[in-house]
Image (cartoon, grey):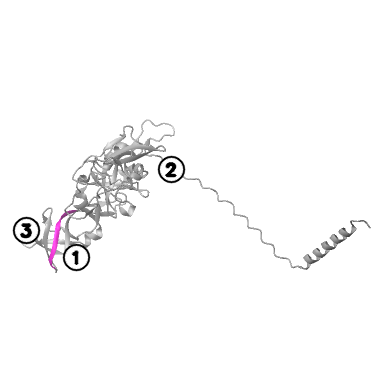
Amino acid sequence: MNDYSAPRCLAALCLAILLAACASTPKQPQPAAPAAPPPPAPVSQQAAPPPAPVIQPEAPRRYVVKKGDTLWGIASMYLRDPWLWPDIWYANPAVKNPHLIYPGDVLMLGYINGRPVLSVERNGQLVNEAAAPAPAPSLLVEKLEPQIRYSALTEAIPSIPLASIRQFLSNTRVVSKDEFRDAGYLLRSLDGRPAVGVGGEIYARGLKPLQGDRYDLYRLGGKYVDPGNGDTLGYQATYIGEGQVERWGDPSKVLLIATDQEAYAGDRLLPVATQQLSQNFMPHDPAKKVAGDIIAVLGGVSQIGQYQVVVLDRGSDSGLDPGTVLGIYRKGEKVADPYSFGDLSGSVKLPEERSGTLMVFRTFPKVSYALVMQARREIHILDVVHNP
């Protein structure tokens, strides 16, 4: 027998014992293979950023804010479309709220990644979010009352010329058919005079104690009608004064405690409004597609131009709110074409042409008041308005 036979036999014996042990040991479950990860979701393409607002060629690199300035007027110096001025200030943390710009502030135009931005310097220091703000305006809202409280000249400059709209913030309103039908009315004065001023006493009917004992007097004016379907949108109401009920009954006795003009029989009494009206406006595009018409002009004028107040046949029910900017367009008329030939018809409808820009400053459910901010050409009643 060879010298290495014993070790080989011994190795074979060990291998046999090991195989027998493995055969008698219960098999352990094998761990499940990990599930294949789901395929990666397709990477959505990011929407391209909106184009930068178009800067006016003569836009100043540095401008000192002055008394009498408005944000719209300043924006017109910088932008082709002034209502886009929040875009060039929103990207700049130095101007979180454009309404907080004051006479003496210095605006500085610059560019970041090709997009225009405005910085503000106040008292020789660059304004930022950590800087102490200038004193906040003491009046940011306007109560619907005959007397208007004015902001001090040291406060933030307004968005638009407030002098053009003040009387329409308080001295007029639009009432619905239901309000008109249910309103109380002046029957006659106690002494029988046809006209009554402040301090006069009147008899009134249709007043309801649940509405309170203070009433505003309004004189109903023209009816606003939708030119598309003929529906009544409301009635213009001009503020006359305010009355305090002295004795309830039918008729009730009312003391006139304030008047802008003399009251007459038939004037309507509406509960004193508690609506708060802002005097600061943030110009913005409509939240959705809007198409309407100019149905009236306020202020006793016949020509519609810049800073005239117009009435639109769309209101809050159509998504309008204070600050909404709309373009004004002249309807294209259908004209005869004596030179047509071939497949060209003998008449053609001309396209709409942009004639101006307006901004809504007060809304009612079916009607809005708007201020004409730009007038490129004559503007007329029944000109159309829609998204700029």
Of circles 3 and 2, the one toward us is 2
Q: Is mark 1 on a helix, strand or loop?
A: loop
Where residue 314 sits in the image (x, y, percent)?
Answer: 30, 51
Where residue 206 sits in the image (x, y, percent)?
Answer: 18, 65
Name the amino acid type tagged 3: Arg
* Above or below, 127 relative to 10: above
Please state the total of marks drawn on the protein image.
Answer: 3
Q: What element carries label 3?
A: loop
Name the magenta segment's main secondary structure: strand
- Magenta-colored stretch includes residue 239: yes
Cα–Cα span, label 3 and label 1: 27 Å
Name the amino acid type tagged 1: Gly
- Disc 1 designates what residue? 212
CB atoms of marks 3 and 1 within 8 Å: no
- Magenta-colored stretch includes residue 252: no
Cα–Cα span, label 3 and label 2: 68 Å
Q: In which quarter of the image is the C terminus?
A: top left
Question: What residue occupies the far right of the structure in this picture?
Answer: 1
Name the amino acid type tagged 2: Pro
Mark 3 and mark 2 lie on one chain; the one further toward the N terminus is 2
Can residue 252 be seen at all in this image of the molecule?
Answer: no
- Of 198 and 76, the residue lying toward us: 76
- Disc 2 designates what residue? 49
- Of 374 and 299, the residue lying toward us: 374
- Disc 3 designates what residue? 193
Say whether residue 141 is left or right of residue 85. Answer: left
- Of 155 and 211, the residue lying toward us: 155
Q: Which segment did they paint magenta?
A: 238-247
Where residue 277 sits in the image (x, y, percent)?
Answer: 24, 53
